[in-house]
Amino acid sequence: MTTFYDVPADILIPVLADRLEADSKIFRPDWAAFVKTGAHKERPPVQSNWWFLRSAAILRKVARMGPVGVNHLSQEFGGPKNRGSAPNRATAGSRHVIRTSLQQLEDAGFVTERKNAAGTVTLGRVLTPSGQKLLNQVAHDVRKEAEAAYPGLDKY
């Protein structure tokens, strides 16, 4: 069986975004048309489906790095901030975008919070079995396209 580890992200994420867009629990908020995705960006995204692409990327990162929190994910989606004549510095991405997307993925049942033994502290988000199933189904569906784009993948 093909897993999401076997398919490159640039092929997996757009198809996964289309699947998430079909889910009614994942939707683009009203404020998403005006928000930047981080302090290192100058303008909002221009793609019409950027919310679903970001949600798909977040779902994949939670699957690969989980348990993972909002702060760590914001660092993953950050970039270099232009400080004029001063050297660039790393800046985190928008935590609000990531938090809202994670909440929607939780409502859809793809991600859940992992708590400590006492149940008081959240250790981060992890993938649920239904989220794992969705990722692996999408990876299986795009496997032929991935092998055509990257000929070395057929040995895996």
Image: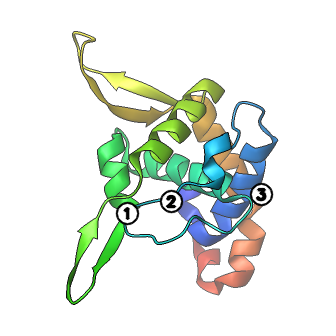
Location of mark 3 (residue) = 141
Location of mark 1 (residue) = 39
Q: Position of residue 61 (x, y in %)?
A: 46, 52
Q: What quarter of the picture does the C terminus occupy? A: bottom right
- The image quarter containing residue 38 is bottom left
C-beta proximity under 8 Å, tags 3 and 2: no
Inter-mark Cα distance, 3 to 2: 32 Å
- Residue 9, label in figure: none
Foreground of the two, 28 or 67: 28
Location of mark 2 (residue) = 36
Inter-mark Cα distance, 1 to 3: 36 Å
Q: Position of residue 143 (x, y in %)?
A: 72, 65
Which residue is drawn at the image coordinates 58% and 34% (left, top)?
105
User: Which residue is situated farthest in the left direction here?
Assistant: 86
Q: Position of residue 85 (x, y in %)?
A: 22, 90
Inter-mark Cα distance, 2 to 1: 7 Å
Local secondary structure at mark 3:
helix
Instruction: Please rate how many residues cluster around mark 3, counting C-alpha atoms within 10 Å: few if below 14, some from 14 to 19, many from 20.
Output: some
The label nearer to you, 3 versus 2, is 2
Foreground of the two, 67 or 30: 30
Above or below, 35 against 46 in this view is above
